[in-house]
Amino acid sequence: MTSKSSTNRAPSSGGRQPLLWGAAAFAAGILFAHYFWRPAAWWFITFAAFTLFSLFFLCRRPWAAWTLALLALFASGCLCIQLRAPEHSNANQILFFTNGNEVIVTAHVIGAPDLLPNVNDRQLVDLETEAIETTGTVYEILAGLRLSIYSNESNADVPAARPFRYGERLRFPAKLFAPRNFRNPGAFDYAGYLTEKGIVVLASTQNAKVEVLPGFAGSRIEFWRTNVHRSIIKKIHALWPESEAALIDAMVVGEDAFIGRSTRTDFQRSGTYHILVVSGMNIGILAFVIFWVLRRFHVPDLYSAGAVVLLSIAYAFLTDVGAPIWRATLMLTIYLGTRLVYRDRSILNAIGGAALALLIFDPAALLGPSFQLTFLSVLLITAIGLPILDRTSQPYTRGLHHVTSITYDRVLPPRVAQFRLDLRMIAGRLARFIGDRFPLRTLASSARLFLTASELLVVSGLMQLGLALPMAYYFHRATVVGLPANLLVVPLTGILMPAAISAITISYFSRMLASLPARVAAYALHGITDTVQWLGTCRISDTRVATPELFAVLFAIVALLFAATVARRRPWITGCGLTALAVSAFWLTTISPRPQISPGKLEITSIDVGQGDSTLLVLPDGRTILVDAGGLPHWMHSDFDIGENVVSLYLWTRRISHIDIAIATHAHADHIGGMGAILSNFRPKELWIGADLPSRDLDRLLAQSQTLNIPVVRHHAGDEITIGETKLRILAPTLDPETNVWNPNDDCLVMKVTYRSSSALLEGDAEPHVERKIISENPMADLLRVAHHGSARATTPALLAAAHPRYAVISVGSRNVYGHPRFEVLSRLAAANVRTFRTDLNGAVTFYLDGDSATPAVSPP
């Protein structure tokens, strides 16, 4: 009677996963309130009403009470995200000093690399300010500051840079500036990223100007943690060569300061980037190894679970890689708790409880890709993967236990018992040649290995299908080789993790004894890197995708929910769910979305790339041309790729998957430094260049275009190209007839783009000498792309009089060191009644030329 009653009540109480349903309702409320704002009082009243009605129906209509409880959780999710407000402190007062004037900063270290990466003698240190001094006045302000410390290479008397320790107090002069996002649609929220880490302002200074003050400031617990972390890093670099140590730093303890951009790219292309960072997989491997060891010593489950939780917490604390590792630790703790308390445990219910706890603590975490990827990965395994394995391989895996026991056959399903009989029959035949019991154990071990490999194949394939949506939406990647890469890399990581941790631990007692596990870890690491390099360099692995359309996103979500819902149904229904999931993944990775363009108009968009140039042309017939791709000068010693992280991201946000023509106006880093990423990501049909001067950047670009089979077309003054109704007339560069050499200051490709009666003049970095030549070429245009970021020498009054533009746009970086745009240029434009836009103030600026006139459109902030 009790069993029947319990069975009848299960659906009304959420079955075995009430917390999972509750977390889903709470998350739905967060998303709804994020996109559809309503006053917080509305949500509070709604929450109270649903709660009261749920209590009223609790004994009368359990199913109604359960439904109303979910709606109450939905309303509480709306209320939580609505009430979440930024913390108010005096930290923002430091923004008053981001006015370009130098100040004296007193601060203490809260985050710094344990060892100095040998990258251009530059290091990033996170500080908490104590005081700001300016014009003789000292202001006590506590705020997060990220300081870039560089060395003066020309001064040999300056002491070498050294790593700073947590709690050290520093004093230095610097100019403060607020973090700035590239103001393009879909741009990465760099300022928000730093805000989450407590960083309010940025600064840079020379190593020689940093004064170390006496005393200590900060937390003693954090001081102890950083010392242990630093000690572990030193042990790693003592046990392995630098190239291996850099990867073990990242994979085992979360220190990625020594990882180069090419290594990161290979891991990203192969779909194994999760191996390169400390994540939930590390916690899973650690827990598995600890359980396995303790079971060998017959430790009870209660003590084993306690040891796993404590060591996982210690590992998360020492690595200090942020929310993902703590989420994994919380999920592991809740799962082990339910495993001990409930005999008939529910993994999904434990996951729901962890999700609900995290979302209550920080509802905004749901909006970030890290949270979504973590829980989506776990749900794919538990909601779809495990039910499939439970009906396919797991019964046979359990049947491989006690293979010599005939009485154990009676408690197994008939097909599994028959499987055991077949193994014994085969072993009996082999016993004539090998021996009595050895063949049966060998067969059982071989079958177990085969089943484990099959399960890994199923789970890896399922992960590739289920994660296709977030990978396409957030990272614009289709991990085509992710399945074979993970099949090889994940087991090797399972060997590397315990071997490396053992080597590090033993090295504190004996370097000689530590050499054996260190060698095992090195072999596993070589297997990982060889696999990643082999698959990561394949052309098919570098498949990039644009932001999917809304309908494709909705279809993928529905397919995922359908596959999870029917995973425990009849095999043919489960197969339909997996088919729908596969179709959604195929759609996201192979079918290009429709670009966001305005057909019948010539669009000219000046993309915000900071102190550089990049212009997108969308022709009336839909063909696309990208003129330059921004870039950073070499003296900045930065591996930030403007082409990958800014221009490509903007194009993908516009759902542009291919570029018809890429144009490199001239060989300056701020114009073509990002063009390499554009060639790789968008594979244009042609690459146009002007002057072919000797240049490291241009030579590298030409070599890349040859590797990618992209034709290179050289254009000079006088060339006219007609594409549909659009005409491109090249005005520069011209060959100097007197010296027959290229003038290095006038090698920029300048063009006039005309659509019917409307036109635009794109000057690039043209100097006055070039402007004087193009005045005679009828440069009249509705839109002027101001030369050389608003340099005082260019955009002469004569050119303005000849071009007579109505609008002008200047591509320029905020508070750049060159002082662009110059006041003189702005004055000339104002005197000529030219309405001027700037990317540092307006972000990406678009002009639509309809054949008669131009219409500007500024991207929202």
Image (cartoon, rainbow, N blue to C red):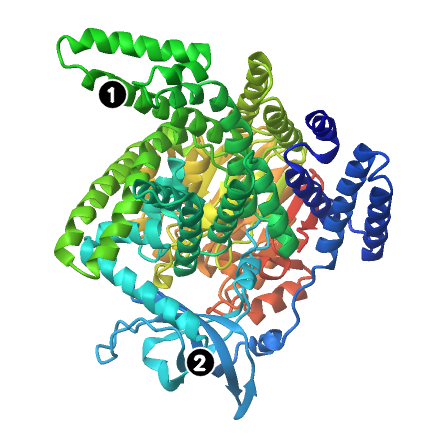
- Residue 476's place in the image compared with 113, above or below, is above
Does residue 819 appear in this view?
Answer: yes
Which of 860/465 is in front? 465
Q: Provide residue 465's location: percent of width, then percent of height.
A: 50, 28
For label 1, the residue is: 441
User: Callout 1, which amino acid?
Assistant: Arg
Which of 111/573 is in front? 573
The quarter holding residue 592 reads: top right
Which of 181/36 is in front? 36
For label 2, the residue is: 217
The quarter holding residue 449 reads: top left
**51 horizontally vs 583: left or right:** right
User: Which image quarter holds the N terminus?
Assistant: top right
Which of 109/772 is in front? 109
Give neighbour class at mark 1: few <14, some 14-19, many 20+ (Cα, 10 Å).
Answer: some
**637 horizontally vs 324: left or right:** left
